[in-house]
């Protein structure tokens, strides 16, 4: 009997485990009337945020051949929506590691800029006159913004180009070549030469030169040309005059300012609440009819939303939303819900939202919002939340 | 007197003959492993409130459902046993019974509970979970004269879950409806850590007292779950921490003048009122992120006094009958903090808690240590009724009624038993907006006893 019983005791441990692990899971709403009186329901509400005009925070226009902007933009445009603006393009080059000894042995006799023009915004019927300046000091392109102007020392040359996509060349004058002969043949070229700035003095188009296929070329021996690859770019933006179309609030890619968006809600609107989903919707306007024939422009395909803290320094990129064919932009992400949640808890320091163009865009494209629309057509936020009061 | 004391002191198990010592030692080790497993696994899971939400909705109210596990024997006999004493069980319902020890005793148990809840017009739902019944430890300071006992057992338990499926038009533009589940959960409870001493004043009177450290966390949460990546699931969690020290005094009195072969013992306890210090905080939880909501509240929670009276009667050594009555003055409950069913500035839904129980034990072997194994199995039955100290509605009282039973199976180890208990009952009613719980509890208890702290015999 002892043996019989003790053999049964061996099942005690598995039995204990079974007891611990087993749990019938068939919950039901029974008892809801005993709990819901002290808890809130999940609701959906719509708010109409308002555009709060422009704020000065430049778009990211700097880049290297590894990261950031993929082209530099230069030229002047009289845009019917945002008004006249100009872009100054900066570019720097790096020497190749396998330069032949023959090139270093003889004086440079020829040099030009070979530029791959892959982007045009503006009048394609008339030529653009470009002024090329030499940059006097080293500069940083990574995370460079459109409000960053560099010190361009001296005019190297001027040239006129037709706004047509493709590779074009700008010969550099012999005076400049002879002055830079030693630098061009030096192994410390990168440290001694800081690139060019390109500005338009005439024409009404902004041109974009891509990293790919663009270089500074030099030759000291006939038939032996050395390419100095484009290594970093930056584009700076400025308004020629403040003559934007008053019917629209517009955001331009590559600009030195952005659009702010404010929500009218305060904590008292929700009390303590759990935010599950926040969707912000915008309707951009179709402004294609405002542009004349021969004005080449490409519509942006996406725009970003970021949160700005009251310190005006902290910014959080939240999400990039695609612009639908009908012009609707929808921002919908867990990060956005978390930002609004933190704002409701008063521990985020959120001041407003801003729209921005992603750095990958790297154009001067425009998105415009019609002013004075009723709330149902203007920006709005759809908020799913649960009251905790 | 000898018969009267049979209610108090079981036969001397150490006089039994047992199989070889090495095998007995191995079995002790196995039993200790079982106990350690029980405590090591279940106690943390009890402390981890998130895993314990499958109980009665009535546990939401007040400080939770009152718990009273005092020994597996008492539990199988209706839950009373204030006048009971046994050298084979540490009876923590009455500290005066700590005097009746000659073995060091270590006991613990698990309870598996399945509840089917129903209400008028609603389909029923079933939830089940296992939890720690309690852990006891005691030893004699002077054999059968003075002893001490320690116990860790739930004082109250909050464990409920109500899931409601709904939809919300999450996008008015498209009319998209999104399903979601709101899960109201409660978990946690108060624990009682007790240290007591019992002393036999003379052959008739036994006195005892204990200090009870009551502590714990009551947690209430509302989880909104969408099961969609488009939504962020969030939970609001309210936690109330409480702690305080209470005291209990107890007595047992052996009634003189009983006929031969019979024994009658009276027992009673008095739980003094105490104040728990409480703090309450709320937080919004999203995965690992936890944001505090509002400000932390502090206040006192005053537990009321209570008393219990019991009687144990042994008409013949094989039979033991008990009856008990317990009263807790929850009508005078006061708290600076509100609880479901209790508002400090309103009319509370509290009422005095009353519990009555009766039970019987049939132990064929009685005091014969040489009886067969099967005749040393004890059979127990009991019943109880209880009026809860709090109700969801002021004009309703929540009553429970149940039947208990159990088997105590002796092991090879002297003084050690394995007890299986059963408790079947119902709580509340399914009308007037209330819920009727039909529950079944299965208890598994290990009760280990051995001589410790002995001086080796001289010579």
Image (tube, helix red, strand yellow):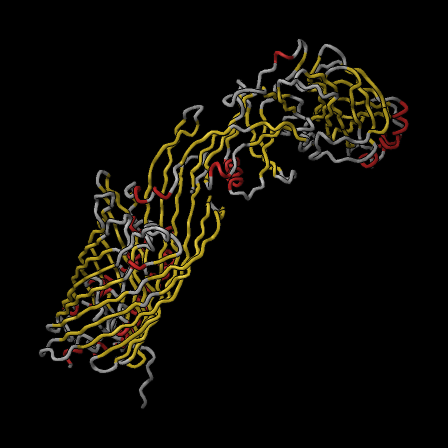
Residue A334, percent from left and from top? 50, 36
> Would you say residue B33 is visible in this rendering?
no
Residue B426, percent from left and from top? 20, 51
Tell me if residue A237 comes above or below residue B161 in the rendering. Answer: above
The answer to whether A25 appears left or right of B282 in the picture is left
Tell me the quarter of the picture where residue B277 sits. Answer: bottom left
Residue B96, percent from left and from top? 27, 74
Q: Residue furthest bottom?
A: B459
The answer to whether B33 appears left or right of B256 in the picture is right
The answer to whether B377 appears left or right of A285 in the picture is left
Query: Residue at (48%, 48%) from the top-left corner?
Result: B294
Tell me the quarter of the picture where residue B88 sits. Answer: bottom left
> Would you say residue A130 is visible in this rendering?
yes
Residue B322, percent from left and from top? 17, 67
Quarter of the picture holding the C terminus of chain A? top left
- Viewer-nearest residue: A120 or B335: B335
Query: Residue at (78%, 29%) from the top-left corner?
Result: A228
- Viewer-nearest residue: A310 or A148: A310
Tell me if residue A241 comes above or below residue A354 in the rendering. Answer: above
- Viewer-nearest residue: B400 or A121: B400
- Viewer-nearest residue: B118 or A41: A41
Quarter of the picture holding the N terminus of chain A? bottom left
Tell me if residue B6 comes above or below residue A243 in the rendering. Answer: below
Q: Residue furthest left?
A: B259
Number of residue marks: 0
Tell me the quarter of the picture where residue A43 sits. Answer: top left
């Amino acid at each position: 009997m002892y043996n019989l019983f003790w053999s049964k005791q061996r099942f005690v441990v598995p039995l204990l485990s079974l007891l611990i692990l087993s749990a019938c899971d068939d919950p039901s709403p029974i008892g809801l009337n005993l709990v819901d009186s002290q808890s809130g329901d999940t609701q959906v509400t719509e708010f109409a945020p308002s555009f709060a005009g422009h704020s000065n925070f430049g778009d990211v226009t700097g880049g290297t051949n590894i990261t950031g902007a993929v082209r530099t933009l230069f030229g002047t445009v009289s845009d019917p929506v945002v008004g006249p603006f100009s872009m100054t393009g900066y570019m720097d080059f790096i020497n190749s590691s396998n330069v032949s000894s023959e090139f270093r042995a003889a004086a440079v006799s020829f040099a030009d800029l070979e530029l791959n023009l892959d982007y045009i915004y503006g009048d394609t019927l008339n030529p653009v006159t470009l002024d090329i300046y030499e940059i006097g000091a080293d500069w940083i392109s990574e995370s460079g913004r459109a409000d960053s102007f560099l010190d361009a020392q001296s005019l190297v040359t001027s040239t006129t180009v037709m706004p047509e996509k493709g590779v074009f060349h700008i010969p550099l004058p012999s005076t400049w070549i002879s002055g830079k002969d030693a630098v061009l043949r030096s192994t410390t070229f990168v440290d001694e030469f800081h690139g060019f700035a390109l500005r338009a003095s005439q024409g009404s188009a902004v041109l974009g030169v891509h990293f790919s296929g663009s270089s500074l070329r030099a030759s000291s021996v006939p038939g032996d040309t050395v390419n100095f690859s484009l290594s970093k770019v930056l584009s700076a933006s400025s308004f020629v005059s403040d003559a934007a179309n008053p019917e629209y609030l517009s955001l331009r890619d590559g600009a030195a300012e952005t659009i702010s968006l404010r929500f009218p809600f305060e904590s008292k609107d929700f009390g303590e609440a759990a935010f599950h989903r926040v969707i912000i919707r915008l309707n951009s306007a179709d402004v294609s009819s405002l542009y004349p024939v021969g004005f080449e422009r490409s519509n942006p395909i996406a725009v970003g939303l970021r949160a700005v803290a009251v310190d005006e320094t902290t910014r959080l990129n939240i999400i990039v939303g695609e612009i639908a064919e009908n012009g609707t932009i929808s921002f919908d992400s867990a990060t956005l819900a978390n930002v609004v949640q933190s704002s409701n808890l008063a521990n985020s320091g959120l001041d407003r939202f801003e729209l921005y163009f992603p750095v990958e865009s790297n154009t001067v494209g425009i998105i415009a919002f019609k002013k004075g629309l009723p709330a149902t057509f203007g920006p709005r936020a759809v908020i799913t939340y649960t009251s905790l009061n | 007197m000898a018969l009267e004391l049979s209610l108090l002191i079981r036969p001397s198990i150490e006089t039994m003959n047992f199989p070889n010592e090495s095998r007995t030692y191995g079995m002790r080790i196995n039993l200790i492993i079982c106990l350690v497993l029980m405590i090591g696994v279940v106690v943390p899971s009890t402390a981890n409130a998130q895993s314990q939400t499958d109980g009665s909705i009535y546990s939401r109210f007040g400080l939770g459902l009152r718990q009273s596990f005092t020994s597996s024997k008492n539990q199988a006999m209706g839950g009373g046993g204030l006048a009971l004493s046994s050298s084979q069980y540490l009876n923590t319902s009455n500290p005066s019974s700590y005097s009746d020890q000659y073995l060091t005793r270590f006991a613990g148990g698990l309870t598996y509970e399945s509840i089917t809840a129903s209400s008028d017009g609603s389909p029923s739902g079933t939830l089940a979970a296992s939890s720690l019944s309690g852990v006891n430890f005691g030893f004699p300071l002077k054999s059968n004269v003075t002893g001490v006992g320690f116990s860790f057992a739930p004082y109250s338990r909050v464990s409920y879950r109500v899931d409601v499926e709904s939809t919300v038009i999450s996008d008015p533009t498209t009319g998209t409806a999104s399903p979601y589940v709101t899960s109201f959960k409660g978990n946690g409870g108060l624990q009682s850590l007790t240290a007591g001493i019992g002393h036999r004043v003379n052959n008739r009177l036994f006195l005892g007292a204990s200090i009870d450290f009551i502590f714990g966390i009551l947690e209430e949460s509302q989880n909104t779950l969408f099961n969609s990546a488009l939504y962020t699931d969030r939970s609001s969690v309210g936690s109330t921490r409480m702690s305080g020290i209470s005291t209990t005094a107890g007595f047992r009195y052996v009634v003189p003048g009983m006929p031969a072969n019979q024994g009658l013992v009276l027992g009673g306890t008095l739980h003094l009122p105490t104040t728990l210090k409480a703090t309450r905080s709320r937080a919004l939880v999203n995965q690992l992120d936890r944001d505090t909501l509002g400000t932390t509240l502090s206040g006192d929670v005053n537990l009321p006094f209570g008393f219990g009276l019991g009687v144990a009667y042994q008409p013949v050594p094989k039979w033991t009958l008990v009856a008990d009555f317990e009263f807790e003055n929850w009508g005078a409950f006061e708290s600076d903090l509100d609880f479901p069913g209790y508002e400090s500035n309103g009319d509370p839904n509290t009422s005095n808690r009353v519990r009555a129980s009766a039970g019987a034990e049939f132990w064929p072997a009685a005091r014969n240590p040489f009886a067969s194994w099967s005749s040393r199995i004890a059979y127990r039955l009991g019943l109880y009724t209880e009026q809860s100290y709090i109700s969801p509605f002021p004009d309703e009282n929540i009553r429970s009624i149940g039947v208990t039973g159990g088997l105590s199976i002796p092991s090879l180890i002297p003084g050690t038993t394995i007890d299986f208990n059963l408790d079947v009952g119902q709580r509340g009613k399914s009308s007037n907006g209330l819920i009727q719980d039909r529950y079944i509890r299965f208890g598994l208890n290990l009760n280990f006893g051995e001589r410790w702290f002995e001086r080796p015999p001289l010579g």
